[in-house]
Image: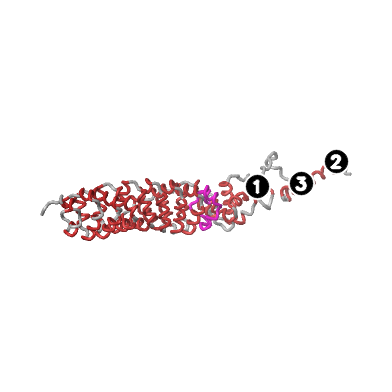
């Protein structure tokens, strides 16, 4: 047993040194010598203690060069800045990680993976489910305009990607999405849950939204738009400028286009179709399958239907009306106010007008012809070939024929007049 007071003192100092070495992973030899002998420079601040949670900065040349690190911030943006600073330090980057350019360079550094091996950044890795996803995640959190791995953004877990993109200001979000390659953009948007996709697209300014949607390939565009609920879809399409809207709708495959237009509420559908230029409107409506076209036109309120049909060029109008089944055609024409009905029928070439009028059921044909004013009726019937005139008029009941202007009927060929009832002919002027 050690009984000498001096020996006891020396033994205590040796134990203290051993504990310090065990706890810190090693100290400078000069410091241990000072403790043991009691000689050497006095500490600058004897009462100071090492910050809690600090870690060793690694071996150093002397005790005076040793510096404890500050406690790492627990919030993700703070961790990302610390990560970038470590990567910049490891690569001796000229810009450091203080500037935006420095942050971009640091996050794109190949040293980032090595720095991430520290357990300090495990929460970031866990959040994004892999080390390779950390760089893009941090770039988004720090509001950087360029991503280190644009092609890999879609690898972020969907909930993380959705919430992170939704937090970006409109300008930053637009810059990030428009900088992605086509395949990456499609993967990102189609990976988002419905609510996240709606929020992201609604946040984009009109120019950014137009650039994003017109960049997508047809399959990706169709998947994105058909995923949106009616309200979100309406907001997206009515935000687009006319040129962007036309390009988006004409890019969609027929099935996707039909689903998009039939999902829109009447007001949104009317605004979308009446925004299109004549050529785009014609291309959109003639691309729809028959059932989709019927539903779209039947959904439009009367003012929107009138504007759509009177905007179409003759060729597009002909294809649209001659594609409709009898019930759909009847609903469309009997909904139009008289001036627009007159314009639509007189715009059609004779062959298309014949097909339209002979397709209508008798009740709708009667309503259409008896609604037209005399000048329009004269133009509608007078430019048809005689067989078509006979086919149309002989389908009308006598009561309907009697309501047609005599001035119009009297100008019909005798071959047509000979097939009309005597009661109708007796009302015509003689000679």
Name the residue rendered at 57%, 46% in the picture: 78
Quadrant showing the C terminus: bottom left
Q: Residues within 10 Å of mark 3 (few under 14, many from 20)?
A: few
Residue at mark 2: 5
Q: Residues within 10 Å of mark 1 (few under 14, many from 20)?
A: some
Q: Earlier in the sequence, mark 1 or mark 3?
A: 3
Q: Is residue 54 left or right of residue 239?
A: right
Query: Is 217 contained in the magenta span?
Result: no
- In the image, which is nearer the foreground, mark 2 or mark 1? 1
Asked whether disc 1 touches disc 3, contact meaning CB atoms under 8 Å apart, the reply is no
- In the image, which is nearer the foreground, mark 1 or mark 3? 3
Residue situated in front as seen by the camera: 102 or 374: 374
Residue at mark 3: 19
Q: Earlier in the sequence, mark 2 or mark 1?
A: 2
C-alpha distance separating marks 1 and 3: 20 Å
Residue 227, x across and y down, in percent: 47, 51
Residue 100, x across and y down, in percent: 50, 51
C-alpha distance separating marks 3 and 2: 21 Å
Residue at mark 1: 67
Q: Is residue 289 left or right of residue 317?
A: right
- In the image, which is nearer the foreground, mark 3 or mark 2? 3
Span colored in magenta: 139-165
Q: Specify whether residue 145 is in view.
A: yes
């Amino acid at each position: 047993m050690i009984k000498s007071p001096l020996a006891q003192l020396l033994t205590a100092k040796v134990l203290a040194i051993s504990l310090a070495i065990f706890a810190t992973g090693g100290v400078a030899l000069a410091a241990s010598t000072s403790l043991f002998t009691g000689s050497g420079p006095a500490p600058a601040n004897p009462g100071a203690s090492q910050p809690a949670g600090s870690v060793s900065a690694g071996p150093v040349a002397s005790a005076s060069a040793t510096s404890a690190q500050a406690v790492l911030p627990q919030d993700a943006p703070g961790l990302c800045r610390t990560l970038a600073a470590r990567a910049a330090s490891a690569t001796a980057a000229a810009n450091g990680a203080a500037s935006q350019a420095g942050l971009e360079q640091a996050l794109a550094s190949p040293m980032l993976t090595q720095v991430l091996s520290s357990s300090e950044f495990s929460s970031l890795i866990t959040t994004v489910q892999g080390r390779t996803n950390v760089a893009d995640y941090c770039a988004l959190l720090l509001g950087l305009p360029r991503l280190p791995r644009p092609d890999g953004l879609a690898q972020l877990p969907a909930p993380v990607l959705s919430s992170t993109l939704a937090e970006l200001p409109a300008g930053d979000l637009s810059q990030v999405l428009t900088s992605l390659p086509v395949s990456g953009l499609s993967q990102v948007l189609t990976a988002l849950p419905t609510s996240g996709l709606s929020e992201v697209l609604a946040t984009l300014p009109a120019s950014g939204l137009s650039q994003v949607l017109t960049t997508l390939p047809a399959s990706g565009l169709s998947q994105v738009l058909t995923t949106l609920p009616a309200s979100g879809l309406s907001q997206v399409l009515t935000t687009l400028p006319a040129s962007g809207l036309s390009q988006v709708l004409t890019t969609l495959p027929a099935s996707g286009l039909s689903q998009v237009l039939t999902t829109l509420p009447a007001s949104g559908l009317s605004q979308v179709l009446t925004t299109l230029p004549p050529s785009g409107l014609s291309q959109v409506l003639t691309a729809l399958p028959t059932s989709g076209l019927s539903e779209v036109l039947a959904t439009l309120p009367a003012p929107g239907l009138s504007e759509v049909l009177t905007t179409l060029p003759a060729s597009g109008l002909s294809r649209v009306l001659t594609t409709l089944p009898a019930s759909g055609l009847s609903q469309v024409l009997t909904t139009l106010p008289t001036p627009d009905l007159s314009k639509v029928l007189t715009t059609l070439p004779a062959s298309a007008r014949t097909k339209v009028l002979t397709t209508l059921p008798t009740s709708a044909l009667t309503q259409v012809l008896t609604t037209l004013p005399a000048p329009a009726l004269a133009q509608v019937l007078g430019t048809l070939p005689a067989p078509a005139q006979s086919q149309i008029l002989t389908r009308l009941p006598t009561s309907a024929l009697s309501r047609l202007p005599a001035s119009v009927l009297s100008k019909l060929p005798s071959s047509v007049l000979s097939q009309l009832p005597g009661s109708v002919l007796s009302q015509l002027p003689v000679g």
